[in-house]
Image (cartoon, helix red, strand yellow):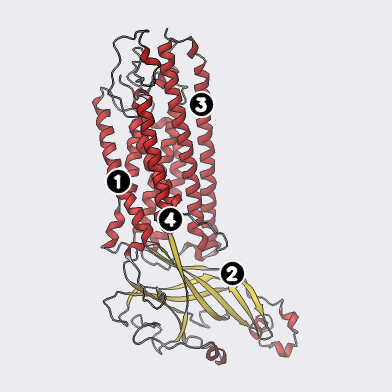
Amino acid sequence: MPGTILENLSTRKLSILVTCLLICQALCFLIGGLIAPLPANHQNILGMVCKDIPGSQNDTSVWLYTRGKGKCNAVSQEEIEQHDVKMANQIVFVFQMPIPREGHVLDYSRWQQNLIGVLQVDIAYDNDVLVGKIYPFISLASLKISYPAFLFLQLDSHAVVTIDARLAYRNKEDSDYDWKLYATSLERRYLDCQSIHVSNTERLYSCETIPLFELGSLHHDFYLLNIRLPVDTDMKMNLDVGHIHDLQLTAIYQNGGFTKVWLSLKTIFFPIVVAIMIWFWHRVHLLQRSPALIEYMLIYLGLALTFLNMPLEYLTLAFDMPFMLLLSDIRQGVFYATLLSFWLVFAGEHMLIQETGKRSAVKNYWKHLSAVVVGCISLFAFDVCERGVQLRNPFYSIWTSRVGTNLALTFIVLAGISAGVYFLFLCYMIWKVFRNISLKQSSLPSMSAARRIHYEGIIYRFKFLMLATLICAALTVIGFIMGQIAEGHWKWDENIEVQLTSAFLTGVYGMWNIYIFALIILYAPSHKQWPTELNSSNERIASEEIEFNNLPSDSNPSEISSLTSFSRKAAFD
């Protein structure tokens, strides 16, 4: 049997291959660090308060906007403060996106892919309102409560704000007033506020950011958000919230320049991985045996990487595809599941503890793989619960309720812990592999010089490959955990700053492709055949140009690696 390229390739050729792959890996990091901008950017937009048009509360064809012909007139805070009921049900908070920069009108590009909006709420609470919640119908003045005593009166920590949110869009060729409805919804959001200023007349609160909407595609040039805060006594809407002093929208979007770099890498890697898979499978089928388990796993891993590499984002430049975020998560999840499963099988197949000639099968690893599958299915179900619903209602968020927030945080924490436990378990398996190899190495001195050099070279190469696997796994787990935190920090704690740099993202993505590319090449069947006889006078065995051909006794057709047979064969002298 020919064996694998990892065993048979000369040291000089292998060194050239590894050097080229390391150069490609360095280029991936440099492209992200020197060429690509930050993966995401954001704009902070202070909502303009406009007076609502009478009778338009239920009319989704009426839009208030802040720029262009027919724009609304702003209402000052003085007018609101002087009104008896703070102009309840008469004002609209208007956000027109994107905002101009240095006098230039900007528009969104389809290269920016997606848009996320979170709200920052500032509340002004009158003293009489606070006291009225404790002593109904009694004013602060009549109670003669002093100013210091007022400090103990607080906004309800379980306050809920009801938001009538309406999102519209238009394009460059449309008129300033030609806004079209994108989505509308009546949403409830819990408030978590802290007092930032206290005076004799009111207390000001600044609240944590609350998720508002998430668009899976950015197909149009301009977007408009109208927010109404309906006050209704019968339905108990916004009765205990107080006066919303300011609303600030943070619009988060992917940088178009980063998308171009990312798609360029996908465009390069996609055909290369497809070509190397075809070449690998052709070599496997030339052999007079059925493919081994590792060969099957390599093909599955290559298919998952190909699915991830497919540059489907090009389609968003021509078509509106709001499901792209969900599809990207599915592709990422399939790749993670396959990669994590492969590492378990890869390490298990090299334990070198099998004592029978029985072929390995996936069912032998069902305990290990079931944990990976259950974890990935759980994350998929969690993702579908949010982004799947957002295809119908972009204002939906699982973070809007306390139960949903706690559930989401539990999923994220468990996912991070599971990733860490997985990495520790993988380290344990690789340690067992190294220990078994060390035990078997004790038999090397009793072997002939040819066989000893043959196995020593293979063991050295295999150890290097396992260390590369460990580094790849560590960076993958770190990237997964950081990605979960970076994606969720806008929704559950704005004080945690985790910035995934472009260099890290492009570097890890390049590492996946280069690592799997190397595995497919090195574990492909070699075309070199065994020598008819092995003469001790052949001094090429000790040279740098040695081709690690299989020895005549290594002829088990069920194995792809003579390293595995090393654990089963007696010393050959």
Q: Please report whichever mark, 2 or 3, sits nearer to the chain's N-terminal start.
A: 2
Please say if the residues under marks 2 and 1 sit with CB atoms less than 8 Å apart.
no
From mark 4 to mark 3, how far is it between C-alphas? Answer: 38 Å
Task: Check disc 2 and give the amino acid type.
Answer: Asp
Mark 1 sits on what residue? 270
The quarter of the picture where residue 492 lies is bottom right
Please say if the residues under marks 4 and 3 sit with CB atoms less than 8 Å apart.
no
Q: Where is residue 569 in the image (x, y as percent from the top left)?
A: 42, 13
Task: Check disc 4 and give the amino acid type.
Answer: Asp
Quarter of the image with the N terminus in it: top left
**Element class at badge 2:** loop
The residue sitting at 37% across, 29% down in the picture is 14
From mark 2 to mark 1, how far is it between C-alphas? Answer: 46 Å
**Front: mark 2 or 3:** 3
From mark 4 to mark 1, how far is it between C-alphas? Answer: 26 Å
Q: Please report whichever mark, 2 or 1, sits nearer to the chain's N-terminal start.
A: 2
Mark 3 sits on what residue? 434
136 is higher (above) or lower (below) than 412: below
250 is higher (above) or lower (below) than 65: above
**Element class at badge 4:** helix
Mark 4 sits on what residue? 383
Q: Please report whichever mark, 4 or 1, sits nearer to the chain's N-terminal start.
A: 1
Task: Check disc 3 and give the amino acid type.
Answer: Phe
Mark 2 sits on what residue? 192
Q: Position of residue 146 (x, y in %)?
A: 75, 84
Residue sitting nearer the eye, 153 or 138: 153
The quarter of the picture where residue 214 lies is bottom left
